[in-house]
Image: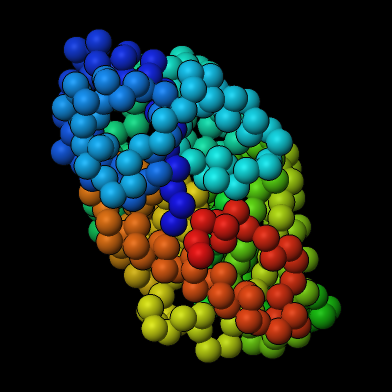
Amino acid sequence: MNSTTYIELGFWQKLQSDSSKEGIRSQLEISDVLEDSKVITDIPIELIQQDEFLQNLLLKEQQPTPCDTNYISKKVNGLNNDSSIEDLCATYMLASTATACNYIEKEFGVIALSAESIHNRRNLFVGDGIDMYRNIPYPHRYDSFKDKLANPCNSIIIIDPYIIKKKMVDSEGCVSFPGLTNNMESLLDAIIPNQLKIDFHLTIISSLDNPDDIKRAYEKFKKCLKRIKKELSFKLCIVYTETGYNPDIESFHSRHVLSNTFSIDSEDGLDIFDGRGYITKNNPVISIVFPRLLGDCRKDFTKSINWIASVKKHIQEAPDKFICGVKDNRLFDLVD
């Protein structure tokens, strides 16, 4: 995956000069040190050679790419053009204030860290991610889930062979998909931001009782997204799968949510919440990881790469009648 991290000199200078950030610096120093990321920085080579953490960047197979002083700020200013897939899936460590970084995250769905706000983002440096268990009495499970997942994103792939497989037809002939209404809507509401300056990319791959229902499912998803995220513009794609998307990687039964900043794995499906906001009894463990950032999470990183690549291949090879919507997703451009 072409994961890119931009590091401004001002970010590192502020982080180094603030003694209260010592714990964060320690976590950075014992991490994989951006091992799987292409690092672009305006930090002079002389300073990199003198700094204990920055020296590790020189030990990577892919050494950091130097850039001019204003290069990174120009990249940030260019996000609004939606022209660079790489930049819209990148991580930014900026000399900007926390307020400025928060604006970038909310408007473009990328991670933008400032030295003053990084202590609030410790979950990004936890390689093992976060697990939520059904038998632990969270005060408000749905709110707790949303809080733990309070990270920006602009692209998502959802893999669940059963989430819209079943349909229901009422006495008046109206068709509905219970998996969307009862489960997927609350999940989408929790993980998709309320606003972005750019289109949100959403790809869903699942089975259907009848593949001819794919257009109907697509329209139901469009109405759902319009209802819960009125301010967003979507590029949506629903993809039917019959036998799985890449059995060499994992079974058809597995369920995943992949985004440009996090991923979710669920043991028994993505029907995570019941009507009261509790984690359902059929879903004992929800794992949330941040595989593209700094933590020691190479296994999760590799798994995300494999899943994104397998879904991309499946869409490329699937008959047109099994696909409805826009095939594009930024995540597909991050794998070969």
- Can you say whether 50 is above or below 60 in the image? above
Q: Locate residue 125: give its quadrant.
A: top left
Q: Residue at x 39, y 83 (%)?
A: 248
Q: Nearer the viewer, residue 134 or 80?
A: 80
Identify the colour scheme used. Answer: rainbow
Q: Residue at x 31, y 14 (%)?
A: 13
- Give the image location of residue 79, x and y in percent: 63, 34
Q: Locate residue 268: give its quadrant.
A: bottom left
Q: Locate residue 140: give its quadrant.
A: top left
Looking at the image, can residue 267 be seen?
yes
Q: Residue at x 65, y 30 (%)?
A: 78
- Can you say whether 93 is above or below 61 in the image? above
* Quarter of the rendering occupied by the N terminus: bottom left
Q: Nearer the viewer, residue 127 or 226?
A: 127
Q: What is the number of callouts on the image?
A: 0
Looking at the image, can residue 150 be seen?
no
**From the viewer's perspective, is 198 left or right of 118?**
right
Residue that sits furthest to the front in the current view: 46
- Can you say whether 85 is above or below 287 in the image? above
**From the viewer's perspective, is 156 left or right of 291?**
right
- Give the image location of residue 180, x and y in percent: 62, 66
- Give the image location of residue 60, x and y in percent: 26, 45
- Give the image location of residue 312, x and y in percent: 57, 70
**From the viewer's perspective, is 16 left or right of 276?**
left
